[in-house]
Image (cartoon, rainbow, N blue to C red):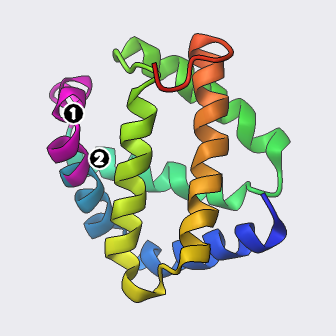
Amino acid sequence: MTESDIVLVENSFSTILPQRVRVARMFYDDLFQTAPHVRPYFGAANMSEQGVKLMDTLAFVVGALRDADRMLPVARELAVRHVGYGVRAADYDCVGASLIRTLAAGLGNTFTPDTRAAWIATYGLISEVMTEAAYGPGKVAQ
């Protein structure tokens, strides 16, 4: 990721952060509609609390984009926990697509092609690290 990508991600995230409850709801609505097979991973979870966790995790990631030594171990640990919920490597693609659609909806016309590309790069980095930690090298989208 370039410095320009990081700035685009930081700026766009700061724009949606005041709407975090609505954005989290939009994300999970999109995810469950487009990938209904992931709904059981959440069991009887309180989705409001889950939304807070999602936004807190995104805030951590965005805040640590310049500090891989701080971010990547947390991402790896999170990935290993997700295996226990039944998450499969291919599910990361569904989550990424929902994230991008949610950002596009939440940011409207400020979600420029460059901002989209920066978020795709960010999510690509995180999902690659997470799937490798959880399933081993080369297990993305299986």
In front: 67, or 48?
Answer: 67
- Residue pictured at 34% horizontal, 15% vertical: 86
Q: Which of the 4 image quadrants contains residue 137?
A: top right
Give residue 4's position: percent from left, percent from top. Answer: 77, 74
Q: Which residue is mark 2?
A: 49
Real-space CA distance between mark 1 and mark 2, rounded to the nearest whole angstrom: 8 Å
Say if the magenta span includes residue 34: yes
Q: Which residues are magenta?
A: 30-45
Q: Residues within 10 Å of mark 2 (few under 14, many from 20)?
A: few
Q: Main secondary structure of the magenta part?
A: helix
Q: Residues within 10 Å of mark 1 (few under 14, many from 20)?
A: few
Task: Report the number of discs.
Answer: 2
Q: Which residue is mark 1?
A: 45
Please state if 124 lies on the left or on the right of 69 as rendered: left
- Residue pictured at 18% horizontal, 52% vertical: 29
Residue 60 in sight from this viewpoint = no
- Residue pictured at 39% horizontal, 50% vertical: 97
Instruction: Specify the amino acid type for callout 2.
Output: Glu
Give residue 45's position: percent from left, percent from top. Answer: 21, 33
Q: Tell me whether the residue at label 1 lies in contact with that at label 2, contact meaning CB atoms closer than 8 angstroms.
A: yes
